[in-house]
Image: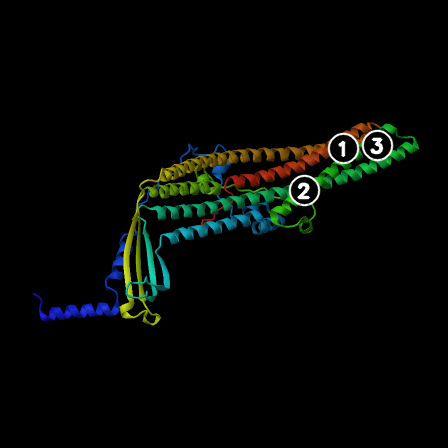
Amino acid sequence: MLTQRDSDDGRRRAAQRRATGYPRHAIQVISVLLAGLCAGCSLAPREAPPTSALPAHWNDPVLDSASLPPAADWWRQFGDPVLDGLVEQALEHNLDLVLAAARIEEARAQLGASRAEQMPSLDAQANASRQRSASTAGGGGQIRELYSVAGVLGYELDLFGRLRSATDAAHARLLESTYTTDALRLAVVTDVISAYLDLRATERQLAITGATVQSRQEALRLERASLRLGSGTELTLRQAQAQLASALAQAASLRDTLGRTQAALGVLTGATPQALIEALPPAGELSTLALPGELPHVLPADLLERRPDIRAAQAALRAADADIGAARALWFPRINLTALIGSDALRVGDLFSGPAASWSLGSALVAPLLDFGRASAQVAGAQARRAQSETLYRQTVQTAFREVRDALTTLREAQARERAQADAVAALTRARELASLQYRDGRGRYLDVLDADRSLLSAQLDQTAAARDARVAAATLLKALGGGWQAQADS
């Protein structure tokens, strides 16, 4: 039996509710629901990247015996300040890298949007209406106005991990974009080094050919003089003319190659060919560019962590797994919670008064019953994309090891070729001197001089090409080993 005191307390609490318009436990209920039910399960597969049969060591002891990895600015090992400046310019202005940076920002924005989907949404809502009710038998219809202002809170319970899987996929794609950009940086740096070495080699070959042209012009002048004096023959004159014409044709071809190389390097660095020409010093010996003395200490298994393209493929695999989880969640119900707290009144001035207060709590469950295989098709598509990502990962690993082996073999053979060509140039230089001495003394033929001169020119050009190839091979090997890539992707 209620006492008078209990009755008074009940009336007091009822009066407080009427004055405020809100139940005191409404907000507490919303908070408990949101905090207690936000944890869900993920349906994404948790598969490790496919394993490959990796050797314990490289066949070449050089890669396993070095003590230090290359620095992040590994191209500085060539010891050429001009090359250093070109690489830095390319890293700043190369349009491919600018485009890749924009793609990273896009992936970062998509990650932010996915994370926001996991959070509650709070919207403001205001309505104003004026309506006339239907006429009745006793009189005309009434005109009434209604005003309302409310805050609407919405939240999807991620019980089956659909939103979480979408966020995981967006995060993995951000990592993929970042690692892909790192791989692109490696490629751009290597392309700049290769183009610069081609430019230096072509300039040097053009200088050698130019000196040969001058020498052959002088030889032709002497042969013409000898023919006028009766001590020469038309045969030797025509041979000298042919040698000069051959050298001039070779110089024209080299000038064409030089222009193309300058244009290519200008595209890589974002500079015009004219600006590039003005910035470069005169041609010098390629042998003055040092070969990198230390190669990275890299075991075969380390390559999986050093190569950014492999890590990008790993991130693509994780994104594919998350996509499968998000697709599988479509098989299960979705639960949405809503809460509304506001004020309704017939006049604007009565809004936010105690009697005008209103609130509501609600939930909605949507479960698939018949979708004619839409969800299953999305799961099958996600699984097929995962299979593609796995295949691409395997291909990337295979390509990485092939590139290392090829680059190591190319570097070794290019260095051997450079040494052999240096010996050949020294021997042919002496042979040309001897042929010239014998011809001037009347003990040799002019054809021997021409053959020696032609062989020396070819050997000098080949020596320059060999020096270029050795340095390009060194840069290619460093790129294949991951270069100086040490950046960590932002989450």
Q: Residue at x 75, y 32 (%)?
A: 454
Image quadrant in which you'd find residue 323: top left
Residue 354 against residue 120 in the figure, above or below: below
Pointer 3 local density, CA inside 10 Å: few below 14, some 14–19, many at least 20: few
Residue that badge 1 annotates: 453
Q: Residue at x 68, y 32 (%)?
A: 424
Nearer-the-camera pick, 491 or 44: 44
Q: Amino acid at mark 1?
A: Asp
Residue 41 rendering spot, x and y as whole percentages: 30, 45
- Residue under pointer 2: 260
Q: Quadrant of the N terminus?
A: bottom left
Q: Is residue 431 visible?
A: no
Query: In the image, 411: left or right of 435?
Result: left
- In three-dimensional space, the C-alpha distance between marks 3 and 2, rounded to whole angstroms, equals 42 Å
- Disc 1 packing (10 Å; few <14; some 14–19; many ≥20): many
Q: Position of residue 319 (x, y in %)?
A: 41, 43
For marks 3 and 1, the one nearer the N-term is: 3
Label 3 to label 1, Cα distance in Å? Answer: 15 Å
128 relative to 281, above or below: below
Q: Secondary structure at mark 3?
A: helix
- Residue type at tag 2: Arg
The tag on residue 440 is 3
Q: Nearer the viewer, residue 231 or 87?
A: 87
As drawn, the residue found furthest toward the left would be: 1
| Residue 33 placement: quadrant | bottom left
**Left or right: 35 as drawn, with respect to 258:** left
The amino acid at mark 3 is Arg
Q: Residue at x 35, y 46 (%)?
A: 162
